[in-house]
Image (cartoon, helix red, strand yellow):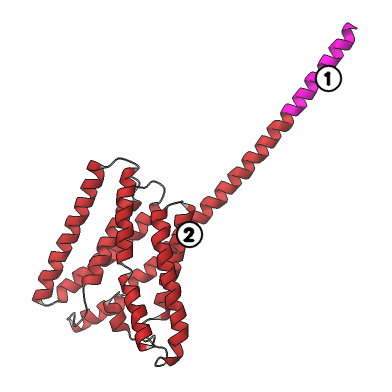
Amino acid sequence: MLQKKIRKLRISLSCRNCNDQKFEKSIGKMTIQQTGFISTYSVLSEAAGVAGNFFAFVLFVSPMPTFRRIIRRQSTEQFSGLPYVYALLNCLICLWYGMPIISPGIILVATVNSVGAIFQMIYIIIFIAYAERGKKVKMLGLLLAVFAVFSIIICVSLKFFEPPNRQLFVGYLSVLSLISMFASPLFIINLVIKTKSVEYMPFYLSLATFLMSLSFFGYGMFKQDLFISVPNGIGGLLGIIQLVLYFCYSRSSDGGRPRAPLLESYA
């Protein structure tokens, strides 16, 4: 009888070991699947951010023909420097939002806006160099105002806010800044509808705007960051409207060739 009890005990122990091994294997498989999902998710997130950086770079270099013309003629003519000042402030605010001290894990927002800030500074310096005296003084004043506002934002966010409220404060400012930048595409959309012509709206610039907004919208969704996804979602919708208008009115334009100066003055 004692031997039978010992055998039963051994059998039960062996069954428990088997169940434990099966349980460990199932947990291991689930861990591998979760790791694979997280890895794929991370890769897609970073890919969206890199794509957004690339298309943003295309937009940053788009005003170069304008400034080649300014340098060649040594005059700013009727071009306005305000869009570049606004763009600089926007890049600085979004750069600050993307810094790890404000929003950890979205460094690609910081990289793209740091590049954008450098381009806008170069454009502003060139504009000031060739502008008339009155415009020089005005642009220098606006440039100092941009740096003053940005300095205040940094000081206030660091001194009066702690995480996560710091991210909320800078995030709302970045959204307001991005929304203010929609004035340019809205102006162009209104102009195309009024003139029924796309001569002032280059196709590739509209396409790059749409693709950049779409990329950063995806990046924001992957990162679960509404301060990135919402404004870029709006930018994507405006990009779609521009592309639809282009295909609607391109046949009525003069050969479909855009006149660069007007658009570039609002770039």
Q: Quadrant of residue 64?
A: bottom left
- Say above or below: 24 vs 223: above
Helix, strand or loop status at disc 2: helix
Helix, strand or loop status at disc 1: helix
User: Residue at horizontal 22%, vertical 55%?
Assistant: 150
Residue 76, horizontal then vertical, whole percent: 19, 79
Q: Amino acid at mark 2?
A: Gly
User: Residue at horizontal 59%, vertical 48%?
Assistant: 37
Q: Which residue is mark 1?
A: 11
Q: Quadrant of residue 230?
A: bottom left
| Quadrant of image for the C terminus | bottom left
Q: Could you say which is closer to the camera, residue 264 or residue 75?
A: 264
User: Residue at horizontal 66%, vertical 36%?
Assistant: 28
Give the main secondary structure of the magenta stretch.
Answer: helix
Q: Quadrant of residue 140?
A: bottom left
Can residue 156 be seen in the rendering of this structure?
Answer: yes
Q: Could you say which is closer to the camera, residue 253 or residue 84?
A: 253
Residue 101, horizontal then vertical, whole percent: 32, 44
Q: Residues within 10 Å of mark 1 (few under 14, many from 20)?
A: few
Q: Which residue is mark 2?
A: 218
Q: Amino acid at mark 1?
A: Ile
Q: Tell me where the magenta segment starts and ends, as one range.
A: 1-20
Q: Which mark is residue 124?
A: none
